[in-house]
């Protein structure tokens, strides 16, 4: 895939090393606008590290990432690259909304206040306008009646839906989900996946690290299998989940489904 207007994410040679551990080993990645990409693989395969590099929480040791044409972490002038300062990186990071395994809500704030916090303090938008948008987002994730509830008064599934609404409030171009259902009780998983299905249906570009193979089969345009910091195989859900060509992928899917 070329760096065409339809390509929102472009990564080349992304490598991340922690001590003696090569968490990402020269990963290439292209994601089109409106595409839903699911990433599967065993623990420690580099899936979460890849998301954290895309969102500039981690800085790759080498390689290049562009989000909507912007070079992550750098400004290019001619042939020379200049490293961005923390403020400029924070501005770039606004293009990506990220939802973590743990909900990371502010416990002293209500659901509504959690959603309003970023647009008011970071984007400097007017409180009343932000409040209207936040209430609409609560409605979108099925929690209009919980606007005044604190995180401790919400189930895990409800907290994760507030976390998704909070990320959406920043109007990102790309949503990153790092195993968003892994900390939830099984009966609460469906309510979070339903919100993500709705986002996919309206054309939100999403990269989802997940063990929910049923969700990947139903919603993803493409699935990537990672192992040992590399992309082993990529294909449509039908190709990769039903007819994988690599033995390592076959073994992983068999273990998850057993």
Image (cartoon, rainbow, N blue to C red):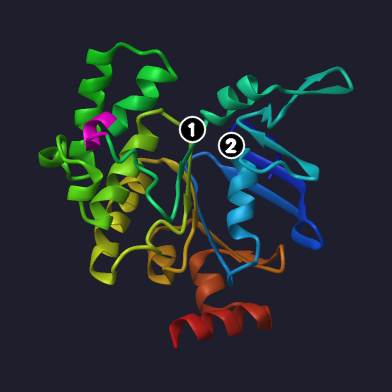
Kind of element beneath mark 2: strand
Would you name the residue on which mark 2 appears?
A: 8
Would you name the residue on which mark 1 appears?
A: 173
Foreground of the two, 76 or 52: 52
For the N terminus, the image quarter is top right
Q: Which residues are magenta?
A: 109-113
Q: At which x and y percent is residue 242?
A: 50, 78
Residue occupying image coordinates x 57% and y 22%:
91
Kind of element beneath mark 1: loop
Q: State the image quarter where residue 86 is shown.
A: top right
Position above or below: 239 against 163? below
Q: Is residue 19 left or right of residue 244?
A: right
- Mark-to-mark CA distance, 2 and 1: 8 Å
Which of the two labelled residues, at mark 2 and mark 1, occupies the earlier sequence position?
A: 2
Q: State the image quarter where residue 123 is shown.
A: top left
Foreground of the two, 26 or 216: 26
- Whether pointer 2 and pointer 1 mark residues with C-beta atoms closer than 8 Å, the reply is yes
């Amino acid at each position: 895939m070329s760096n065409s207007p339809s390509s929102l994410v472009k990564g080349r040679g992304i490598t991340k090393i922690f001590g003696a551990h090569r968490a990402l080993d020269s990963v290439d990645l292209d994601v089109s606008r409106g595409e839903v990409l699911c990433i599967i693989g065993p623990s420690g395969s580099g899936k979460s590290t890849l998301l954290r590099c895309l969102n500039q929480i981690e800085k790759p040791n080498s390689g290049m990432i562009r989000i909507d044409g912007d070079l992550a972490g750098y400004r290019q002038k001619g042939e020379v690259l200049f490293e961005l300062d923390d403020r400029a990186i924070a501005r770039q990071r606004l293009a990506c909304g990220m939802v973590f395994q743990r909900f990371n809500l502010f416990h002293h704030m209500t659901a509504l206040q959690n959603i309003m916090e970023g647009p008011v303090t970071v984007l400097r938008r007017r409180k009343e306008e932000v409040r209207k948008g936040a209430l609409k987002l609560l409605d979108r994730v099925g929690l209009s009646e919980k606007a005044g509830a604190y995180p401790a008064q919400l189930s895990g599934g409800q907290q994760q839906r507030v976390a998704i609404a909070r990320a959406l409030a920043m109007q990102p171009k790309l949503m990153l989900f790092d195993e968003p259902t892994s900390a939830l009780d099984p009966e609460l998983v469906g309510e979070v996946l339903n919100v993500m299905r709705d986002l996919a249906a309206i054309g939100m570009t999403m990269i989802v690290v997940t063990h929910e193979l049923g969700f990947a089969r139903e919603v993803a345009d493409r699935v990537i299998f990672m192992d040992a910091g590399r992309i082993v195989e990529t294909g449509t859900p039908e190709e990769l989940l039903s007819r994988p060509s690599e033995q390592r992928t076959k073994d992983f899917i068999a273990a998850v489904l057993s």
